[in-house]
Amino acid sequence: MLILGIETSCDETAAAVIENGRTIRSNIISSQVLVHAEYGGVVPEVASRQHLATVVKVVRQALRDAETSAGQLDGIAATCGPGLVGPLLVGLEMGKSLAYAIGKPVVGVNHLRGHLAAVYLDHPQNPPPPPFPHIALLVSGGHTSLFRVEGQASTTLLGATRDDAAGEAFDKVAKLLGLGYPGGVVIDRLAADGDPHALRFPRALPGREDLDFSFSGLKTAVATWLASQGRPPEDELADFCASFQAAVVDVLVRKARRALAREGLRDLVVCGGVAANRGLRQALAAAANEDRFTLYVPTSKLCTDNAAMIALAGTWAIQRGERGTLDLSVDPGLPLA
Ligand code: KG4
Ligand code: ZN
């Protein structure tokens, strides 16, 4: 079964072909990051235009890399939300048009469902795929949530951020430090050489016993620190980044452990762009060792936005018999049903 996935929910134009719900035949990602960097964040209208200019090329390249053609596909999956409305429309309309032309099914995929599926894609370093049910920590630029995942299409939300997402906190702090956009990966790189105990930033554990998150207080603490002390000199930047990163990672790890304990489960999936963070990966691996649970993390390229994860979630939907119609539309605030 060959499924083409299309992902355009934010600022990556991506297309991928996967085979039999596991093997990645191609995975093309065209990033708009340089276009938006000039503005310090994603400009939705610019993103839409950029997707429009790129999507056909990206889909063609995905088919070429997979050594296949549109006619050989068994179906098409495109992200239909949540995300930016204009960008989502470009990808979904592309998917619907192509599906109509080749007479094959099309399905709309929830972007979060894609992130949760990414760990099931084949890659050599991973242990066997996680069993159901398991706990998933989804940490991205738009979401920070803990789920109990019962099956391919069945999830219960256990907790979520009450304000900023973890990735958003990384990006905002990077911006305050003048590290450019998106800054998560820059903080990660600098933090690797820094001392996480150099500065003590607040760990917000709202409600303590619950599984919600809050990162706006941490962002304010960083902003206040910078306003009073000024930007740290170059040789102290690594310590600053490591200390900030540790504050985010601590809370994520603590809540993930609590979720596993509360639900009586022993398998933890971490996904979304922030799952690429090396500090988070290391801290979770240490926790897994201590608490004796199994940790599953997709490769970095499958943590950040990509279309292979959309193709996989789409494969599952098509296998369940889901079929989109041509009036299928996008929903920028699409919940994970
Ligand atoms: O999943 P994703 O690609 O897009 C959304 O669905 O939001 O996540 C993007 C977010 C951005 O905030 C980015 O700064 C963050 O993930 N990110 C990282 C790292 N790589 C990406 N944050 C920390 N460390 C990283 N290595
Ligand atoms: Zn995402």
Image (spheres, rainbow, N blue to C red):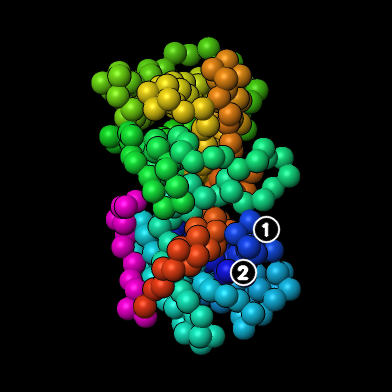
Local packing at callout 1 (Cα closer than 10 Å; few below 14, some 14-19, many 20+) is: some
The yes-or-no answer for disc 1 within 8 Å of ligand 2 is no
Tell me the SS state at disc 2.
Answer: loop
Determine whether 71 is above or below 50 in the image: below
Which residue in the protein does label 2 denote?
Answer: 1
Which mark is in front, 2 or 1? 2
User: Residue 246, percent across and down?
Assistant: 50, 21
**In the picture, residue 135 is in which quadrant?**
top left
Left or right, 256 with respect to 54, comes to left
Quadrant of the rendering where the N terminus is positioned: bottom right
Q: Which residue is mark 1?
A: 23
C-alpha distance separating marks 2 and 1: 10 Å
Task: State the residue at coordinates (62%, 83%).
Answer: 71
Three-letter amino acid code at disc 1? Thr
Identify the magenta region: 326-337
For mark 2, does the 10 Å Cα neighbourhood hold few (<14), some (14 to 19), or many (20 or more) residues?
few
Residue 107 position, x and y percent, is 43, 69
Instruction: Identify the amino acid type marked 2.
Output: Met
At mark 1, the secondary structure is strand
